[in-house]
Image (cartoon, rainbow, N blue to C red):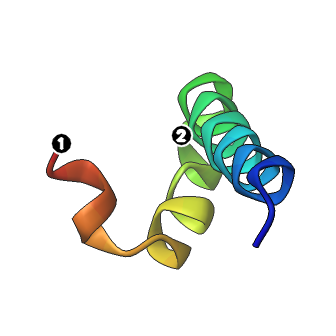
Amino acid sequence: MTLREVYDDQIEWFAGVIADLLAPPESTNIDIIEEPEEDYEC
């Protein structure tokens, strides 16, 4: 993986988190389920 691909993955994940925070309550669980829980340990 190139550095650019790593950054693209991070930006995509972060954009998904932001979208979840801004989304209506009925749609907030969709992206959270797709992410492993290890991402939230930091």
Q: Which residue is mark 1?
A: 42
Q: Which amino acid, mark 2?
A: Pro
At which x and y percent is residue 8?
Answer: 81, 48
Q: Residue at x 46, y 74 (%)?
A: 33
For marks 2 and 1, give the one nearer the viewer: 1
Q: Residue at x 68, y 45 (%)?
A: 16
Distance from Cα at disc 2 to Cα at disc 1: 25 Å
In the image: residue 1, left or right of residue 23: right
Of the pair 22 and 24, the residue shown nearer to us: 22
In the image: residue 26, left or right of residue 8: left
At which x and y percent is residue 18?
Answer: 62, 28
Q: Residues within 10 Å of mark 2 (few under 14, many from 20)?
A: few
Q: Secondary structure at mark 1?
A: loop
Q: Are marks 2 and 1 in contact (CB under 8 Å)?
A: no
Q: Which amino acid, mark 1?
A: Cys
Residue found farthest to the top: 22
Q: Residues within 10 Å of mark 1 (few under 14, many from 20)?
A: few
Quarter residue 5 falls in: bottom right
In the image: residue 14, left or right of residue 39: right
Mark seen at residue 25 = 2
Q: Is residue 27 above or below residue 34?
A: above
Q: Is residue 38 above or below residue 10?
A: below
Name the image quarter holding the C terminus: top left
At which x and y percent is residue 31?
Answer: 60, 62
Name the image quarter holding the N terminus: bottom right
Q: Residue at x 56, y 39 (%)?
A: 17
Of the pair 5 and 33, the residue shown nearer to us: 5
In the image: residue 33, left or right of residue 39: right
At which x and y percent is residue 2?
Answer: 80, 62
